[in-house]
Amino acid sequence: MTTHNHAQTDLIHAPRQAPQYIETIQPPLFRASTIIFKTTAHLFDRHWTDPYDYSYGTHGTPTTFTLADNIAQIEGGKYCLLAPSGLSAINLVNSAFLSSGDEVWVADNIYGPNLEHLKNLQDRYGIQVKIYNPIDANSFQPTEKSKLIWLEAAGSVTLEFPDLKNLVRKAQQANVLTVLDNTWGAGLAFNAFDFSDEHLAVDITVHALTKYPSGGGDILMGSVVTCDQQLHHKLYRMHATQGISVSGDDTAQIQRSLAHMSLRYEQQSKSALALLDWLKHQPQFTQVLHPAHPDSAGHSFWTEVCTTGKSAGLVSVIFKPEFDITAIRKFCDSLNLFKLGFSWGGPVSLVMLYDLKQMRELENTHLQQGLLVRFCIGLEHPQDLIQDIQNALKQLE
């Protein structure tokens, strides 16, 4: 080991060679901003399209690329970029592909912050936002200006499962880029890059890794996946120029959780179905929403696409009109196991209340009148969750 005249220098330049290869259950954690080049040849021969040509922390490390590769594999894609949140991943796609004068189509049940971002782009840059009904493919009428269509399967509040195949087919015929928010399906309920029909697949998926991949309700991250190298390079350029990067520590935590993600997803799917069977018989509700419910909008599309029979752990209910906002707030405040909070996919069950009149722009005849409450099912026993809801409903008597 080389020593210098001063301890201060020795401490800074202590040996940092990587140890000989050892095999561990979890991959090593790399934290980096600066990445050291061995020679000037390595510096000048690097190419930005090579994911293993490490150059700077924002470009990526073995830790971030390991998670990205695994997310791509789970979703059935080839290329993946990570972002600090699901919304950041959404904004990356919008920034990479939309220009002034373009039309972007969004479902009426679109994730609210995505719509807010797009309307901001509309006001500032002249991008036109068009709304379509996700369960009616005929409501999607692309023009020569149409550049991109956002899909959600299922919608994260009212849980309609879209006419995914016909919407994708129609977009392909019009040369419109298809982008699916795949947070609900998580790559486990169905493969968005292979609908088992020849040449039928979405172009890009966006995934809030905050939900099921993280699984703990404590880490924010998002991903953008595609099978198309040209689309990936366009996204990669925008990703780099916007300085988008993620924490190595957060990445390692999500990587650890991937091993049991499918088990958690399946359990929460089963628990949601158990709640669905009970909720649909409760007299306080005028409607219970879940893609597996035969009376829910898009049920036949869910059956067609989700051949696994799996679904995310979300169930929504619409209270009868006689229950006003004061009553709904009392109901939510009376819950014990269900905690009031946004997001889903973690171990703790969550509840959130919504006023659909403030969320929708199209007339939705498939939705009953009333205030909506969404239950996000955690890992508690479903019978305990049912009892919790039952106790809260008694407070409304």
Image: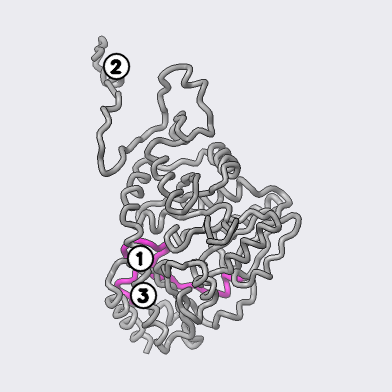
Image quarter of residue 114: bottom right
Which residue was labeled with disc 2?
9
Q: Position of residue 204 (x, y in %)?
A: 55, 52
Is residue 100 found left or right of 150 in the rendered image?
Answer: right
Specify whether residue 341 is painted magenta: yes
Please, is residue 184 above or below residue 28 in the view? below
Secondary structure beneath dot 2 equals: helix
| Cα distance between the residues tagged 2 and 1 | 54 Å
| Cα distance between the residues tagged 1 and 3 | 29 Å
Label 1 packing within 10 angstroms: few (<14), some (14-19), many (20+): some
Which residue was labeled with disc 1?
266
Secondary structure mainly formed by the magenta segment = loop
Image quarter of residue 12: top left
Amino acid type, mark 1: Glu
Which residue was labeled with disc 3?
333
Specify whether residue 383 is painted magenta: no
Nearer-N-terminus badge (1/3):
1
Q: Which residues are magenta?
A: 335-360
Is residue 362 found left or right of 287 in the rendered image?
Answer: right
Please, is residue 21 above or below residue 157 in the view? above
